[in-house]
Image (cartoon, grey):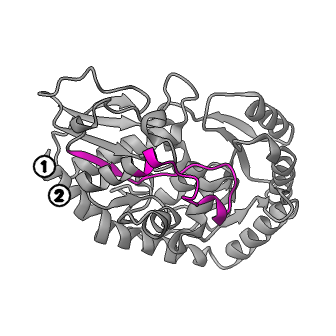
Amino acid sequence: MHLLLTTYPEHKSQNVGDNLIAQSTIRLIRQFNRDFDPTIVFRGKALDGFSKKKVRHIIAPGFSVANGVYPDLFPLYTDLNRLINFHPVGCSFQHIIPSRESFSASHYDDRTKEFLKLVVDRSGPLPCRDQLIADMLTQQLGLPAYYSGDMAIYDADYLGSDFAPPGEIQSLVFTVQHHLQYLEQSIELLKRIKAAFPGAKRYVALHSKPNAISSTVAARAAQLGFETLHQYGDIAKLEAYKAIDLHIGYRLHGHICFLRYRKPSILMVEDARSFGFAQTPGTAVGCFDAFDTGMGEPDAAAPARAMDFLQGEIAQGFQGYKPLFGFVDQTYREIVEPYFRSLAAQL
C-alpha cells in the first residue's frame, strides 16, 4: 500500500487547487508506473492506524515546511521512527503577508527545525514549489532544498507544446480572492475588466465553496455581467478553462491552471503563496502585487497596473509569456521528470 497525503479539504472548503496538486502528482507518477493506485489520505489525519507492514511509501505533494508543520498541519505518526520512504514534493509555505520578510525562519521553533532536519536526513533535499521557499530552507535553516515548481503546473498533454495565444479575447474568467481586505480592490478590477472587454463572455469563478467574501464578490460580478462558475471540488470542472481565453484574478491555482493549459493569465498577489510564485524568476510574468507593504494595505493602483500590462501583452500577442512556458518545460525535463521516474521505479 502506498499513501498519498493530500492538502485537499474535501470535508471543508473543497479548494480545487489543492485537489489539482494531488491529482497532478498521481498523473505524473503514472507516466512511469501505470499501476500506481495510492490510498489518498487528508493531511490532517494521523497515520498511526495504518499497519506498519502494509504502508510502503508515503507521497506528500504540497507538503508544508511552515513553522508547526508537525504535528499541527501534518500529524503523520506519533512515533516518527515509522516515517520511512517519505516523499515530500512541491513543498509549500504559508503566510498572510506577501513580502520577502514573510519568508523568515527566525520564528521557527526547535521542534519544527528538528522535524525538518529529520525529513531531510531520511528523504533527501526538499523539492520546493517556489524559489523563495528553497532559499529560506537552504540559507536560513541550512537544509538542502531546490526548486521543483508546483506539481499542478505540469500536464503531460501540454508539456513541450507551442504556445498559441488567443488572437482576440472572446472569453475570460476572474477568480475570487481569499481575503476580505481586497474586496474594494477586486470590485475595481472587475469594473476595469468589463470596460476593457465589453463584448467578451465573462465569468467569475469560485475555487472554494461559497463563503461571505466570495458570495459578495460573485454577486457584484453578476451585476456587471459575469456568469458564476462553481469550480470547487472535482478537478474535472477545471476542464472548462480550456475553452476560455484568459484568466485574471487572485487564486494562485487559477493562474497556475491557465499556465498549465498554455494560456495567458494575470495573478493578483495577495499572500505569501502567490508572492513566492511571483518572485521565482521563471514564473514572474503576469504577477502583480495586490498589497502595498509600505502602506500596510491593499494597493489601490494595482488593478490599473495589471490592466495596462495586459493591454500591452495583447498588443504584442502575449510574447512575454513564451519564456515562462520554456522555463516550465526546462524545469520538467531537468528536475521533475527525473524525480518521478526515480520515484516510480521504487513503487
Asked if residue 220 shows in the view, the reply is yes
Front residue of 267 and 321:
267
Asked if residue 261 shows in the view, the reply is no
The quadrant of the image that shows the C terminus is: top left
Front residue of 161 and 299:
299
Residue 165 located left or right of residue 27: right
Query: Magenta span has 107?
Result: yes
Query: Magenta span has 297?
Result: no
Tell me where residue 19 appears, x and y as whole percent. Answer: 45, 38
| Magenta segment boundaries in residue numbering | 85-113
Q: Residues within 10 Å of mark 1 (few under 14, many from 20)?
A: few
Q: Secondary structure at mark 1?
A: helix
Tell me where residue 185 appears, x and y as whole percent. Answer: 84, 51
Q: Amino acid at mark 2?
A: Ser
Q: Residue 301 occupies which quadrant of the picture?
A: bottom right
Q: Residue 125 occupies which quadrant of the picture?
A: bottom left
The Cα–Cα distance between marks 2 and 1, rounded to whole angstroms, is: 7 Å
> Which residue is denoted by mark 2 in the rendering?
342
Tell me where residue 274 appears, x and y as whole percent. Answer: 61, 56
Residue 43 located left or right of residue 176: left
Tell me where residue 144 appears, x and y as whole percent. Answer: 35, 65
Residue 89 located left or right of residue 95: left
Query: Where 115 sits versus 255, above or below?
Result: above
> Which residue is denoted by mark 1 in the rendering?
346
Q: Amino acid at mark 1?
A: Gln
Circles 2 and 1, Cβ within 8 Å, touching? The answer is yes
Q: Secondary structure at mark 2?
A: helix
The residue positioned 77% from the left and 58% from the top of the image is 291
